[in-house]
Image (spheres, rainbow, N blue to C red):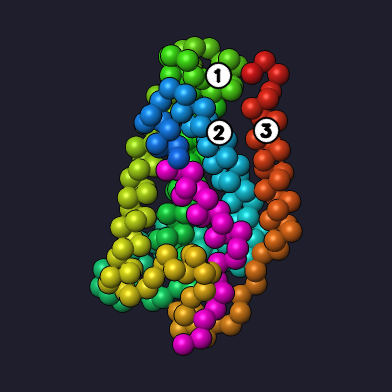
Amino acid sequence: MSKILVWDLPSRLFHWLLALLVVVSWVSATLGGNAMQIHMLSGYTILTLVLFRILWGFFGGRHARFASFVRSPMAAVAYLKALRRNEAGRHLGHNPAGGWSVIAMLSVLLVQAGTGLFANDDIATEGPLAKLVSKALSDRITGIHHLNVELLYVLIGLHLAAVAFYFFHKRENLVKSMVTGYKDAAAGLGESAQSQGSAWLAALLLAACAAGVYLLIKLPGA
């Protein structure tokens, strides 16, 4: 069966680097102590990657763009109902429900990384921008940081469950396609080669996001 390149290289690298960094952040936060320095560096990198993915959602390859997979909430509900009846069609890119899961994941990660900049642990570690707000406000933001991570774990659990469902029930290996970038041509209902994002543009956008995050954490007074 012929294959179609669906996920461009920047999208695939983003996905796997983000997964690795989420694990690093969880482990370092669990260990505490000196590992919190690693936690903070991981958080800065996650913020950089999320900002990059948002930009890539407008300038990336066809299936990386939000316009290709963000549908109305009703379309997502209709897809889930069809999936329950085993009548859902196949999609080369994200299906309508999966598209909203991407938006939810990016939003939660953005909140997590953003609140971490102002958070503190009441011991020896605080975010680089914690000094720019009052201790009371930093404590409230820290509470959001701790609560939001639980939501992140729920989304990760749902994501893994969806991957397992598609593998065992739909016989579709989503992990493999996110590694190679390719999917079976049959999933595209006759679609041919997909437009891919520019690697040079991706590098420039990532560099700009990294520079922006660096300048943010080095704000005067921080």
Task: Between residue 212 and residue 39, name the one nearer to us.
Answer: 39
Tell us which disc is closer to us: 1 or 2.
2
Task: Between residue 56 and residue 164, name the one nearer to us.
Answer: 164
Q: Give the magenta-colored segment's residue range.
A: 1-23
Tell us which disc is closer to us: 2 or 3.
2
User: Of callouts 1 and 2, which one flags the residue occurring earlier in the amino acid sequence?
Assistant: 2
- Place of residue 147 in the rendered image (x, y in percent of width and height, measured from the top left): 36, 31
In this picture, residue 103 sits left or right of residue 217: left
State the SS at label 2. Answer: helix
Identify which amino acid the numbered label 3 is placed on: Tyr
Q: Is residue 13 magenta?
A: yes
Q: Is residue 29 magenta?
A: no
Q: Residues within 10 Å of mark 2 (few under 14, many from 20)?
A: some
Circle 1 residue: 130
- Quarter of the image for residue 87 reads bottom left
Q: Residue at position x 47%, y 80% from top?
A: 184
- Place of residue 53 in the rendered image (x, y in percent of width and height, measured from the top left): 59, 51
Q: Residue at position x 58%, y 15% from top?
A: 131
Tell us which disc is closer to us: 3 or 1.
3
The furthest residue to the top: 135
State the SS at label 1. Answer: helix
Circle 2 residue: 41
CA separation in Å, label 2 and label 3: 11 Å
CA separation in Å, label 3 and label 1: 16 Å
Q: Which mark is residue 139?
A: none
Does residue 69 show up?
yes
Circle 3 residue: 214
